[in-house]
Image: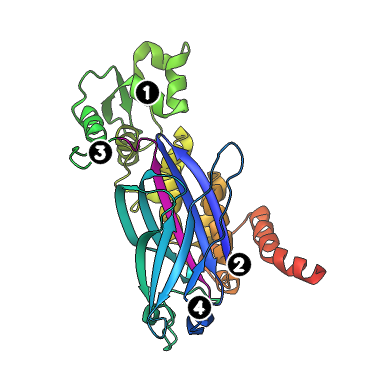
Amino acid sequence: MSNMNYTIRTEGQTKINTLTWTVPNFVNLLENKSTREFRTDKLETVGNVTGSRFQLKIQFLGRDNDIIEIYYLSPNPVFLKSILTICLKRFEERSIVIKEYHTVQGNKWQYLATLFKRDIASYDGRDTFLLSDGSLRLKFQFMVSNDIKVDRANVPETQLSHDFENLLSNGLFSDVTMKSAEGNEYKVHKAVLASRSVVLKAHFEHNTIECHTNIVESPLEAEVLIEVLTFIYSDKAPRVDEIPERLLAAADFYQLSRLKSLCEEALHKRLTVESAIETLQLADLHSAKILKQLTLEFIKDGQAKLITKTVGWAKVKSVDLIKTIYEYIMTDDIEADIK
């Protein structure tokens, strides 16, 4: 029996459907020559959303199920971008397919990707595409645009992000100056800052010093501040993989939720036994709930004993943090004993 986790969120004009599909004992499924197809059940939406959700299926081809094809079905005609990610051991992920925006028919199975048995069920101990319990976990993201009426085949890519980034770099029509902790000055625009950050918006809403001087003093160092401004203007974070810790603190300070999510993702990708405690402390400090959850799962997934031997563990002074780790690790064991 497979397990499906389904979430829907909206970013601007785009609705993002995220499906995490876990198929247990996948090797056994491959060895069963009578199995030619495996699919998710038809899932009805909940809340105020009408219609059915996306469905998924796997088809096994070849005499020995050597080829695995993956398909999806949309309940309605949509204009979408699709991303398929395979979840590996130790919470690593690998994007294996990215299909840019295109029109998809409703209620018709669409081909997405091909996997090979040799990569999934290698018998030399690698099991590259399987989790430690032998399950196959696939994550699908379907980014659906609200407008499917326009044929975008010959329409140039949007320049909005680029144009706003130029507005930052040339300072044209700027009406406020933002200063870094070292005193570096950046010519910026009240309307842009206020529309992106409620914290910056507050500087200009009331009878504040910033309103009178048109100068905003930031506690961030120049290296971090320019990255934050770049994100505010372009929605891009070029150095998020280089300085995710510092950007996470900055995103939390200015309440930039998307930048915060990007930082959490970057920190999750670089999670190791040595960095787990520091990452957990950082997540707790900046209320990064997703990163905290993922780090606790990483610790629980057979890493706890190794982590207690690290430098980070030796420096832990927070009793609450140790208590949190202990309670998270012990939860399933206690529930299992009760049952």
Of badges 2 and 3, the one in the foreground is 3
| Residue at left offset 22%, top offset 18% | 173
Residue to which mark 1 is pinned: 216
Of badges 1 and 3, the one in the foreground is 3
Q: Above or below — where is 322 with respect to 232?
A: below
Residue to which mark 4 is pinned: 35
What is the number of the mark on residue 10? none
Quadrant of the snapshot with the C terminus:
bottom right
**Circle nearer the N terminus (2, 4):** 4
Queried whether the magenta region covers residue 139, the answer comes back as yes
**Circle nearer the N terminus (1, 4):** 4
Q: Is residue 273 visible?
A: no
Hey, what amino acid is under mark 4? Thr
Q: Above or below — where is 95 with respect to 64?
A: above
Hey, what amino acid is under mark 3? Asp
The residue range painted magenta reads: 134-149
**Circle nearer the N terminus (1, 2):** 1
Q: Are marks 1 and 4 in contact (CB under 8 Å)?
A: no
What is the number of the mark on residue 151? 3
